[in-house]
Image (spheres, coloured by chain):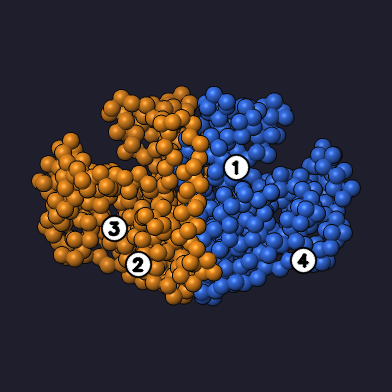
Chain colours: A blue, B orange
Amino acid sequence: MLRIQYEDMRDEFERVLLKYDFTPSKARVCARVFAENSLEGVYSHGANRFPRFIHDIKAKHVFVDAEPEKMTWAGAFEQWNGNHGPGILNALVSADRAMELAKQYGIGCVGLAHTNHWMRGGTYGRKVANAGYVYMGWTNTIPNMPAWGAIDNKLGNNPMVLAVPAKNGPIVLDMAMSQFSYGKMEDLAMKNRQLPVAGGFNKSGQLSTDPKEILKTGRPLSIGCWKGAGLSLLLDIMAAILSGGLASFQIGLQDAEYNVSQVFIAFDTTNLINSHRISALVRHIIKDYKNSMPESESTGILFPGERVLLTRKENLEKGIPVNQSVWDTIKGL
Amino acid sequence: MLRIQYEDMRDEFERVLLKYDFTPSKARVCARVFAENSLEGVYSHGANRFPRFIHDIKAKHVFVDAEPEKMTWAGAFEQWNGNHGPGILNALVSADRAMELAKQYGIGCVGLAHTNHWMRGGTYGRKVANAGYVYMGWTNTIPNMPAWGAIDNKLGNNPMVLAVPAKNGPIVLDMAMSQFSYGKMEDLAMKNRQLPVAGGFNKSGQLSTDPKEILKTGRPLSIGCWKGAGLSLLLDIMAAILSGGLASFQIGLQDAEYNVSQVFIAFDTTNLINSHRISALVRHIIKDYKNSMPESESTGILFPGERVLLTRKENLEKGIPVNQSVWDTIKGL
């Protein structure tokens, strides 16, 4: 495993993006987000995913020079068309616009249709919460998860992100509706390790902790069984309605995952009755939460996004871990 | 088990509420919601809960004549103070107000502080979606669920509701962040039955399907393990920030569950680019979802809220099932 400095990784991504006709400013932003995803430990949507992003450009699923476009507006809620542009850039524009609307109306919502994979949803939650807003957003995906009691995949895992500002960095929940990502299961399968809890079904239809068995059936477990499946269904319907774009089943009819639908909601907190107390409130809630009695001395009680802050610190110091072959691939792009 | 006609149950609740100084119009509305909760199969928050609601009035946790009051406004986002009024009435006012704001601004949000248990969250989702809006709302609760890896309860189970309009009645997801409610576990424990999937921990700290063991430890399982625990934490922080009210840990410092915080968000769909296609879109999504391959012939693939519609139909025909002792208690109030 290599360790690459953040700046070097970002500059390498930027070099490639410029080669693929990104404007200098778009190349810089997009490269920064990919590098930050790896910096903060979300390797699956940082360096490891970058070659596939370039592939999607070549396959004309991602249009490098497309700009998102406002289609409808009704005060605090706007629908935008992503025009098949890079998912990261479209999502950043949408998050910014949701904040502008929230500043004006207290709450702001952007429904974004016909966009591409936003890589790591937490990017946008962290950005909005860092600017002092409360955030909620989600995306739909290709069908990759079954309904409860079903064996074929009709639902997306539809990641949802909630984020609130806090003094030492925001609290950011970034979670897909499947218990484990395919990336995580493939990683543990390669290492011949078991999942810590059941993550899907084996070929006998029994819940299993063996990632190899689950990857064979392609039948991952939704969080909370019927509950996460139901949440996924509703998030998909809402994403399609609010954006005016496609639902998961329609995305599944394509040759690949593009044309996804996303929702970005920001809440302004500066005019609230409790605005001067929010920082103290969040600190107290987190303090109480972390005072939980752990089941064993070795169990850490972490809040969502806490590990990200620790990983970021470590990777800034030591460099970002990257698989040699992944890095070679990127260097060759 | 008795079967009571819907109108008879509603009128009985109304009689009691009038005795406890509800105005005629408030008594009628509140009685209707309690009776509908039982009618639609949510017995735990219908007839079974009604005596406790009267107890909460006597204990002065619920102020019968309190009115919710607007505290701050910033365009599409308002904070209201529930003033300890009946949770159902406060929530109905908030849902109505969110729709009014959505009509004006495209999206509308009400944060409601210092209110009481709203009984069944689906009530408000169903109402808003029946009026043609998309809905999202949630509440916090007393701490009744542990953080992942913890043995004491620092988190609420914080039910969340998502709802969208559909032709034959809305799609409504109404879910708490624990895999099973305490009411469900108590019910199955009494019947000496096991839970269909793990629902909490036994005294050895192992996941268990035995409701008796879980009720002994008081350590229910959050949906998706760390994921549902994280979602619960974020929903609590957001409810407290957006309403200006209390967080779960502060509610837990009281002598009982009151002063809860809630959020109501409505999205207007009439001005959307796709407004004329929404009905067909939802129909297609649900059709595709229900075309899932079931794992066995006896497995039904139901959408969230589908069972409610079936139960409603059956209970309208046959009467609402009520335990004799519960009904006797209500008659004696």
- Marker disc for residue B115: none
| B212, A318: nearer the viewer | B212
Q: Which residue is mark 2?
A: B96
State which mark lies toward you, 3 or 4: 4
Cα separation, mark 2 vs mark 1, equals: 37 Å
Q: First in sequence: mark 4 or mark 1? A: 4
The relative height of residue A14 versus residue B108 in the rendered view (above or below) is above
- Marker disc for residue A144: 1
Where does the image place residue A333, in percent across and percent down from the top left? 87, 50
Could you tell me the amino acid type at mark 2? Asp
Horizontal arrangement in the rendering, residue A318 relative to residue B219 (left or right): right
Cα separation, mark 3 vs mark 1, equals: 38 Å
Q: Secondary structure at mark 4?
A: loop
In this rendering, does residue B178 appear at all? yes
Where does the image place residue A100, in percent across and percent down from the top left? 59, 72
| A121, B82: nearer the viewer | A121
State which mark lies toward you, 2 or 1: 1
Where does the image place residue A207, in percent across and percent down from the top left? 53, 28
Q: Which residue is mark 3?
A: B88
Cα separation, mark 4 vs mark 2, equals: 43 Å
Could you tell me the amino acid type at mark 4? Asp
